[in-house]
């Protein structure tokens, strides 16, 4: 839910929603998200290879997406696999919808 700042008319987005929006603001991160369609799970190396970016850049971008609750990760042996975080994204979208109904 959006938090109320100051007067009853002042609505602000929750911090996790700000992180969600920041995570999706980059064209590179948007391209990465398309890789996770239909429940795909990918390692950092697979993301790097499929998007044509370095492993280091892929790792950084995935960390931003994870902070924004856009992706989640799990360990499978020595490999860390990433996938879309549907519940995190839904929570941010719900917050954003409430915010937009209040402001617009």
Image (cartoon, grey):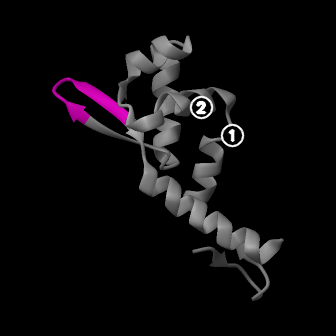
Asked if the magenta segment contains residue 67, the reply would be no
Tell me where residue 92 appears, x and y as whole percent: 56, 60
The reply to whether residue 13 is in sight is: no
Give residue 102's quadrant in the image: bottom right
- Vertical comparison of 7 with 79: above or below: below
Give residue 72's quadrant in the image: top left
Q: Which residue, as the protein is rendered here, is positioned at the far front?
A: 38
Q: Is residue 26 left or right of residue 55?
A: right
Asked if the magenta segment contains residue 76, the reply would be yes
- Vertical comparison of 15 with 4: above or below: above
The residue at 74%/74% (across/down) is 101
Tell me where residue 73 appears, x and y as whole percent: 33, 39
The residue at 46%/42% (across/down) is 66
The crowd level at tag 1 (other Cα within 10 Å; few <14, some 14-19, many 20+) is few
Question: Decide: marks 2, 1 in contact (CB < 8 A)?
Answer: yes
Nearer to me, 90 or 23? 90
Main secondary structure of the magenta stretch: strand
Q: Which residue is mark 2?
A: 29
Q: Is residue 90 left or right of residue 24?
A: left
Residue numbers of the magenta segment: 75-82
Tell me where residue 24 appears, x and y as whole percent: 63, 41
Q: Which residue is mark 1?
A: 25
- Vertical comparison of 74 with 97: above or below: above
The crowd level at tag 2 (other Cα within 10 Å; few <14, some 14-19, many 20+) is some
- Vertical comparison of 87 with 33: above or below: below
The residue at 58%/50% (across/down) is 20
The reply to whether residue 64 is in sight is: yes
Q: Is residue 3 left or right of residue 81?
A: right
Quadrant location, the C terminus: bottom right
């Amino acid at each position: 839910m959006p938090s109320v700042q100051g007067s009853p008319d002042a609505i602000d987005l929750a911090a996790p929603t700000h992180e969600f929006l920041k995570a999706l603001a980059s064209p590179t991160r948007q391209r990465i998200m398309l890789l996770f369609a239909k429940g795909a799970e990918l390692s950092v190396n697979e993301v790097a290879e499929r998007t044509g970016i370095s492993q280091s850049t892929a790792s950084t971008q995935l960390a931003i997406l994870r902070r924004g609750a856009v992706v989640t990760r799990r360990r499978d042996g020595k490999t860390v696999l990433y996938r879309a975080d549907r519940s995190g994204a839904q929570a941010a979208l719900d917050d954003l919808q409430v915010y937009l109904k209040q402001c617009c």
